[in-house]
């Protein structure tokens, strides 16, 4: 385990979007002995696709369609995704410049086709069993207007399922809160970490 190899202690693990699944799975698999807290930004867990067994999930058809679009015309699919990622119709020109959007597009399009598909497939992962094993304090930060990972299927549910959760909602935030609302996210992260330092161990 990396934390043991580097002899790190009292760490705060943080992830954004699909990276929140990595943090969640890491904590459940390797334990929390060296971890003080975690931060999940624009989270993917607990379990995104809606089904009879998961009525609070998001419409699976949207994500199935995205996989088809990625296979058929990846540049067009990436454009559609980034427009939703930034809520470009609402925040374009104010919180996200055309240059920032273009930079994101060129970065995303350089990813291999296999990696792009693999990331989209990972959105179907079920993290509910992992969440049940997490006991460290967890900050959840999410935009209320997240169109990629809807709060009702992700952050709001995590706040109830996790043993020790703090939910920070950015009222007009999209999925890309780490870009469009960086100051708000940083305040939430710093405040959360300061609270952990004051808390008894």
Image (tube, grey):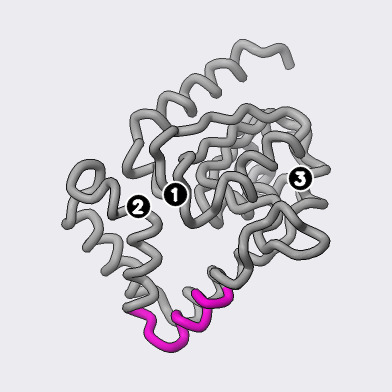
Residue 7's x, y, as percent? Answer: 64, 38
Q: Nearer the viewer, residue 172 or 101?
A: 172
- Disc 2 designates what residue? 87
**Image point 76% across, 45% down: which residue?**
131
Labels 2 and 3 touching (C-beta < 8 A): no
**Image point 31% across, 66% down: which residue?**
107
Residue 50's x, y, as percent? Answer: 70, 62
Labels 2 and 1 touching (C-beta < 8 A): yes
Dot placed on the residue nearer the N-terminal end, 1 or 3: 3
Considering the numbered disc 2 on the image, is that residue within a helix, a strand or a loop? loop
Residue 29's x, y, as percent? Answer: 77, 52
Which is the main secondary structure of the residues drawn in magenta? helix
- Disc 1 designates what residue? 175
Considering the numbered disc 1 on the image, is that residue within a helix, a strand or a loop? loop
Label 1 Cα crowd, 10 Å radius (few <14 / some 14-19 / many 20+): many
Mark 2 or 3: in front is 2
Residue bounds of the magenta highlight: 64-75
- Report whether 98 appears left or right of 24: left
Tell me how far mark 2 sits from mark 3, CA to CA: 29 Å
**Image point 29% across, 54% down: which residue?**
88
């Amino acid at each position: 385990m990396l934390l043991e190899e580097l002899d790190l202690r009292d760490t705060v693990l943080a992830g954004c979007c699909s990276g929140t699944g990595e943090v969640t799975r890491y904590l459940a698999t390797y334990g929390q002995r060296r971890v003080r807290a975690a931060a999940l930004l624009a989270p993917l867990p607990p379990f995104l696709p809606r089904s009879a067994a998961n009525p609070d999930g998001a419409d699976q058809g949207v994500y199935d369609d995205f996989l088809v679009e990625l296979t058929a015309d990846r540049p067009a699919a990436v454009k559609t995704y980034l427009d939703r990622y930034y809520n470009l119709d609402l925040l374009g020109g104010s919180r996200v410049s055309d240059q920032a959007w273009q930079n994101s597009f060129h970065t995303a399009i350089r990813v291999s086709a296999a990696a792009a598909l693999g990331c989209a497939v990972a959105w179907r992962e079920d993290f509910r069993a992992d969440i049940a094993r997490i006991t460290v304090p967890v900050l959840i930060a999410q935009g209320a207007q997240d169109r990629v990972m809807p709060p009702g299927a992700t952050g709001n549910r995590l706040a109830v399922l996790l043993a020790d959760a703090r939910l920070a909602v950015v009222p007009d935030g999209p999925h890309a809160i780490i870009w469009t609302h960086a100051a708000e996210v940083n305040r939430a992260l710093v405040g959360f970490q300061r609270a952990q330092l004051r808390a008894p161990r």
